[in-house]
Amino acid sequence: MDSARGIALSLIRVVLADDHGLVRAGLRSLLEHIEDVEVVGEASDGHEALRLIERVRPHVALVDITMPGLNGVELTARISPGGTRVIIVSVHATAEYVRRALRAGAAGYLLKDASAAELEAAVRSVARGDTYLSPSIAGQVVEDFVHPSDETSELEPLTPRQREILQMVAEGLTTKEIATRLEIGVRTIEAHRADLMTRLDIHDLPGLVRYAIRVGLVDPAR
């Protein structure tokens, strides 16, 4: 029996990752009304979500694109290929956000104003091995593939660890707090931050925060 058929004949196990409790509650309520779908866990930040996914191995993870500590795109990139398939859930309908999500390995991109029927379609499509994009952004993505831009992401020069630390710096965490959360030494964090500033040619904290906001690592409204 192949894996796609196996999922079709059993429950689709789903994890929810969003730092807003009301959003998770709304998604859970909608999913609980879908036959053969079971929510097996929730997480409120990226690191918690990664640990949860590694532990329960759901078929699908619905992941908010902007979460504290580790955003949805970075989280997606860390999930082992061939395992849980990720649907990024976002308020951002721009092609750049979608490109970043797909490059990281996301199998779907769903806008937060999607209907219950679209949520079900996305979960079922991704669970059976297909890719799902909200209809309102699918045209942009197709156009982008037909006429690709020569632009590269501003985050490309940074390593995954540097992007993670940059996000935490922009969220206001101290060096000690970042070191504790990542379980590495304070001096290692300081070295990463110094390298960040050199690579980006930004030499103060407000500059790093502005940069993180501009490239979408953090949401200034949060």
Image: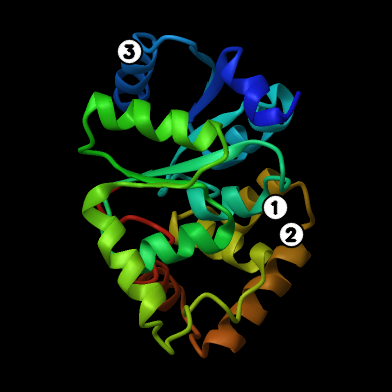
**Count of marks placed on residues:** 3
| Along the line of sight, the residue nearer the viewer: 96 or 194 | 96
- Residue, disc 1: 179
The quarter of the image holding the N terminus is top right
- Residue, disc 2: 186
Place of residue 20 in the rendered image (x, y in percent of width and height, measured from the top left)? 35, 30
Three-letter amino acid code of the residue under disc 3: Ser
Q: Are marks 1 and 2 in contact (CB under 8 Å)?
A: yes
Left or right, 56 with respect to 128, comes to right
Left or right, 140 with respect to 169, comes to left
Residue 137, image quadrant:
bottom left
Separation of residues labelled 2 and 3 (CA atoms): 42 Å
Residue at (53% x, 25% y) in the render: 15
Three-letter amino acid code of the residue under disc 2: Val
- Please indicate, yes or no, whether residue 28 appears anywhere in the rendered image: yes
**Dot 1, how many residues are within 10 Å of its Cα: few (below 14), some (14-19), or many (20+)?**
some
Q: Earlier in the sequence, mark 1 or mark 3?
A: 3
Separation of residues labelled 1 and 2 (CA atoms): 5 Å
Residue at (43% x, 66% y) in the render: 99
Q: Secondary structure at mark 3?
A: helix
| 27 lies above or below 61 | above
Q: Nearer the viewer, mark 1 or mark 3?
A: 3
Place of residue 163 in the rendered image (x, y in percent of width and height, measured from the top left)? 58, 65
Q: Secondary structure at mark 2?
A: helix
Residue at (61% x, 12% y) in the render: 10
Three-letter amino acid code of the residue under disc 1: Ala
